[in-house]
Structures are given as structure tokens and as C-alpha cells.
Amino acid sequence: MRCVACDAAETPERPEHTAQGYRRFRCRACGKQFNERSGRILNRAQYPSDVIALVVFWCLR
Ligand SMILES: [Zn+2]
């Protein structure tokens, strides 16, 4: 996964996960920590991304 701050490619995965179960990474170039959801449109949403996708799907059906 690419760094959300400096777009570096070398971001090893960390052993722990976030409270919602997302994988965490740390950038080797700038030291910033982020997860799979950082920098995306659903970053600040309360619910997991797959739940939001299901609700949107049901509403559009
Ligand atoms: Zn970085």
C-alpha cells in the first residue's frame, strides 16, 4: 500500500490492526502511520466500509 502522505511505496504492514479490523502500515520514508482506510472518502465514517456499501446497495435497489 502506498503512503497517504508522501506516496512512497515501501510501507511495511504492522502486526496489529485497528479497532474496526483494518490493517495498519508505517511509511519507511516519512514515518507516518496509517491504515487501509486512511485518506479515503469513508475515513471518518462511523461504520465499516462493507456495511456502508451494503446499505447504499439496498437503497439503490
Ligand atoms: Zn510517507
Image (spheres, grey):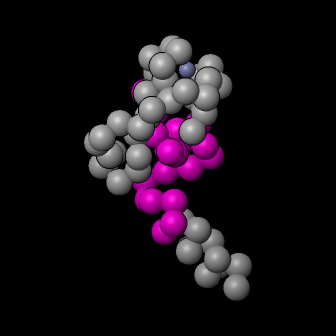
Query: Can residue 4 be seen here?
Result: no
Task: State ligand 1's quadrant.
Answer: top right
Q: Which residues are magenta?
A: 33-51
- Front one among 16 and 41: 16
Dominant SS in magenta: loop
- Front one among 9 and 5: 9
Query: Can residue 29 be seen here?
Result: yes
- Front one among 25 and 38: 25
The percent coordinates of residue 26 (x first, y second) are: 43, 27
Q: Is residue 46 magenta?
A: yes
Task: Check the picture and name the quadrant holding the C terminus.
Answer: bottom right
Q: Is residue 49 magenta?
A: yes
The percent coordinates of residue 30 (x first, y second) are: 51, 14
Looking at the rendered structure, the number of numbered marks drawn on it comes to 0
- Front one among 27 and 40: 27
Residue at 61%, 43% in the rendered image: 40
Residue at 28%, 42% in the rendered image: 16
Query: In the shown orientation, is residue 11 left or right of residue 6?
Result: left
The percent coordinates of residue 44 (x first, y second) are: 49, 44
Residue at 62%, 46% in the rendered image: 41
Residue at 57%, 39% in the rendered image: 1
Residue that lies at the very extreme toward the top in this rendered image: 30
